[in-house]
Amino acid sequence: MLDFLAENNLCGQAILRIVSCGNAIIAELLRLSEFIPAVFRLKDRADQQKYGEIIFDFSYFKGQELWESKLEAKPELQDLDEEFRENNIEIVTRFYLAFQSVHKYIVDLNRYLDDLNEGVYIQQTLETVLLNEDGKQLLCEALYLYGVMLLVIDQKIEGEVRERMLVSYYRYSAARSSADSNMDDICKLLRSTGYSSQPGAKRPPNYPESYFQRVPINEAFISMVIGRLRSDDIYNQVSAYPLPEHRSTALANQAAMLYVILYFEPAILQTHQAKMREIVDKYFPDNWVISIYMGITVNLAEAWEPYKAAKTALNNTLDLSNVREQASRYAAVSERVHTQVQQLLKEGYLREEMVLDNIPKLLNCLRDCNVAIRWLMLHTTDSACDPNNKRLRQIKDQILTDSRYNPKILFQLLLNTAQFEFILKEMFKQMLSEKQAKWEHYKKEGSERMTELADVFSGVKPLTRVEKNENLQAWFREISKQILSLNYDDSTAAGRKTVQLIQALEEVQEFHQLESNLQVCQFLADTRKFLHQMIRTINIKEEVLITMQIVGDLSFAWQLIDSFTSIMQESIRVNPSMVTKLRATFLKLASALDLPLLRINQANSPDLLSVSQYYSGELVSYVRKVLQIIPESMFTSLLKIIKLQTHDIIEVPTRLDKDKLRDYAQLGPRYEVAKLTHAISIFTEGILMMKTTLVGIIKVDPKQLLEDGIRKELVKRVAFALHRGLIFNPRAKPSELMPKLKELGATMDGFHRSFEYIQDYVNIYGLKIWQEEVSRIINYNVEQECNNFLRTKIQDWQSMYQSTHIPIPKFTPVDESVTFIGRLCREILRITDPKMTCHIDQLNTWYDMKTHQEVTSSRLFSEIQTTLGTFGLNGLDRLLCFMIVKELQNFLSMFQKIILRDRTVQDTLKTLMNAVSPLKSIVANSNKIYLSAIAKTQKIWTPYLEAIMKVGQMQILRQHIANELNYSCRFDSKHLAAALENLNKALLADIEAHYQDPSLPYPKEDNTLLYEITAYLEAAGIHNPLNKIYITTKRLPYFPVVNFLFLIAQLPKLQYTKNLGMICRKPADPVDWLPLVLGLLTLLKQFHSRYTEQFLALIGQFIRSTVEQCTSQKVPEMPAEVVGALLFLEDYVRYTKLPRRVAEAHVPNFIFDEFRTVL
């Protein structure tokens, strides 16, 4: 019969593909379960209030139209729904595809069974497949994996969450309308079961059998599979465990499969007493906590509680006397094997001859170790014991007492066993690779000795007192030939012949009285030794390695091992060289990957890479987690070093008096620093001893691990310092901003200095790591803060700054800001609020309007530069940009609301426009016309002023930030500053030239040059925030005239002083001049330039008309409003860097000259 798994055996390949797919689906489900968006759980009040009306469970399908009409009735809900869709559609689709693949899996399996029954595969029926060894294994695995999938889904992805995700996918995706979509079937299969994985949660009735029966499966197939599992050893594992007391361990994998598959036929669990007794006697006579797949553990005492037959059958096993007996037995075994393994691991004990002579003994020791570890780990774990179940608690306490359980000793046994296994495997691999060469060498040596002896008896060789003996000469020649004729490939015959040759050599020594001649004896003994070596060498077989692989399986501890993390870390902290022993344990754990990958590999499936990457990645993350204790301990010592260096050790001056030498020596503190530094370098040494290791398919480089660990610890501490250091009390007078920044600056400086100090002892690039990580923390926090202003949020897994190995911690917000950068920004905005303060441009300082005290100045920005560096200032600048955009968008919607939808305001504006056109003329009776227009629109100016001043205030802050960045860039990296400025000028010149003559080159659409250089220019402060376009705008009617009216309505609130320029008249009615000018300027910049043109023309007309009126009424000095309007024009030209003629086009020169004499 054709090999079942051969490429051309369609029947075998089809079921192999199904099983391979099953393993891949489980890996995908486990991977996805870590990425469930928190909002689908609707755990906290905020989420419930915000998303409660757009996230539905399956009740949605009962009243679909009703729910959708509710949504359509509220535009803000629709908006939220759309935003939610944009942010989550990608991850929801990924979940849906995983759910769909589970359904597809069972449909494919059912189709395969139908094909078998209908004879599609010639000569193959269900019975013949189950008679074949591979076929039997694959059919059992196919059903078992389906059960595992369902259990994993229910354990890792709660029922309500699944329903919400499926409904969201149904509502948001286009797939629901396609005819081939099997959405209904998937929903039926995966609807909530009522099961909860929370400890202490009650189990739903008929769970999981009712869940397993949602898709019907051929009953004959189920019962045949159960029959096979009950009777056969389908994986031939018993041969690896010859001792009868190890039988339940040998059959453990099969027992797990049987446990899962029995739920497909619950009648056996309920009523078939004889079958259940047989199953328990065979598989569970001495164990009741089992691992079903990659470390998912189940306690049968709890799982089989509802089933009568199963519960009765298990009672013998759970009888307290049996529990006591098993616990005591394993306690004794583990004590015995522990001393054995410690003895074997002594330096120089495991030599090649010793190993070859004692293979069976060593394997027995290994079996005992692994069986004891397995039993003790599984039966003492907390995860398999519900603390509320009295009986389980009682059994567990009994085990802990009788087995004298001590997790540290068990862990020590695991470590030593892993180390012993590792050494043995390496030795065997080495011996196998050299096996033939050694055999040939021994054969050659033995044959040569015999030839030499033959020569001795020829009487030709001068050897003391050996007489010539032709018979012996011929006999030894014959033996030499016999030895040479031994054939390596036919090991059995060669072995037999070798034994006969050894006997012959012993006999010749006795019969021919050759003992008297010592040299001849020596030759014979040597030859016998070589022949013995040949027998040993021929016995080195691959089977030993395979047995070790089977016996050493640690997949049951894939999740349990986590409970030993603290013990591992403690032992590393006490003795860093422990890492080398742990390496063997991690490699032993990696052998668990064989289980899911075997079939995927056999099927040549493309999933091999992603599945092995997932499990290897999980394991590497665990290795990192354990070894993180090293950087943690290093940082603890570092903090002490920082304290000593900053507070205790005095800087030694360049010259000092001899009698003061003792004071400066400070031997105590210096010795302490040296001791701590030495401890740090010992930790480094510990991790670097681990050697580069292949964990699964991921190469783990200890140097990289150490660096990542140090980065992780640095990120954790710096992020916490930033979070804690920048929390402000908004009621504090004066503001806590400067003192907090100074304090944080000192903390950051301490980190920086100590990091610089330590880099040589740990052999890392301290400054590089410091800059990369601090910039990452700040950029990530800016990104999270800006998410508030974005419709499509950047999730953690999409962020280029967040990392899985070196995660940036998230803290719960303490106010409306999400992160420290938001709190810093809002605190700056609070203390420089234009309603409370007045910004004096010449002094770059903000003063309180009422008390006239200084509030803050440009020193604030140099302090931020010192504390948070360039990244901090740059991040703050980015956040301000988002805030300006938000303000401008709010302004536009307000403009629509209070101006374009208000008839009276529109009529007033129309009348005014008629009165003042054409704009080149002078308005007669101007005072009255302007004042009446202002009076009629009075109510709209308060919100208008607030919006404009906010934008202006933020623009002032952006200017200060740009100045600070540019200043520090020119100081700290003058070459970069010069290069950027020149490149910028050259680029602009080229672009201008292109617009003059389009044949000249210009950056193409896909060229990122302009985009990239902008980021550099902004970081170096080489840009003007006032020229920025923040939003795209449409045409707005009356826009210039509204802004003009707004400006002249504000002018009476301001007065001009010679020293300070324009300042507010009454603090009760606050207006700050510079935010007003810059706010208006920014606003106009967002629109077409003709609006600005019209706006300036209106101001010019206002100035001309008012001056004309004053002259005719013979008022000698220039009115205050005109002074204000002219100052506005002056400032406008100054800040936009436009030529003067722009202003002079609207106001005659002589008025400006007159105005200067007033100034």
Image (cartoon, helix red, strand yellow):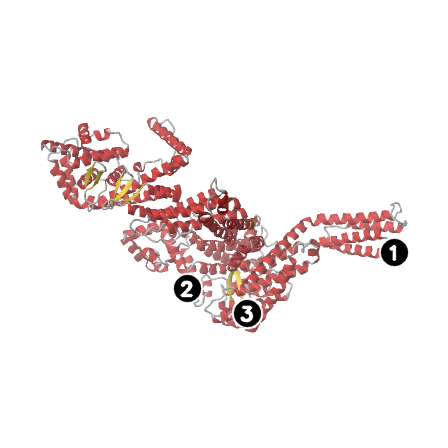
Confirm or deny contact between disc 3 and disc 2 (CB under 8 A).
Answer: no
Mark 1: amino acid? Gln
Q: Quadrant of residue 986?
A: top left
Give the residue type at disc 3.
Thr
Q: Which mark is residue 1117?
A: none
Q: Count neighbours of disc 1 (C-alpha within 10 A) and say few if under 14, some if 14 to 19, many if 20 or more.
A: few
Left of 1127 or right of it: where is 171?
Answer: right
Q: Which of labels 1 and 3 is toward the front?
A: 3
Tell me the quarter of the image containing the N terminus.
bottom right
- Where is mark 1, residue-wise? 513
Q: Secondary structure at mark 3?
A: helix
Q: Nearer the viewer, mark 3 or mark 2?
A: 3
Residue at the disc numbered 3: 401
Q: Residue 160's spot in the image, x, y percent?
A: 39, 60
Query: How far is mark 1 from mark 2, CA to CA?
Result: 90 Å
Q: Which mark is residue 194?
A: 2
Q: Earlier in the sequence, mark 1 or mark 2?
A: 2
Q: In the shown orientation, is residue 41 left or right of residue 119?
A: left
- Comparing 306 with 931, the one in front is 931
Residue 1102 against residue 733 in the figure, above or below = above
| Tag 2 secondary structure | loop
Single out the residue that lies furthest toward the front: 659
Work out whether 1132 lies above or below 133.
above
* Sooner in the amino-acid sequence: mark 1 or mark 3: 3
Q: Is residue 550 left or right of residue 921?
A: right
Residue 856 location in percent, x, y? 30, 44
Tell me which amino acid carries mark 2: Gly
Q: Secondary structure at mark 1?
A: loop
Reply above or below: 767 against 555: above
Q: Residue placed farthest to the left in the image? A: 1113
Residue 693 in the image: state x and y as whole percent: 57, 49
In this view, the mark in front (1 or 2): 1
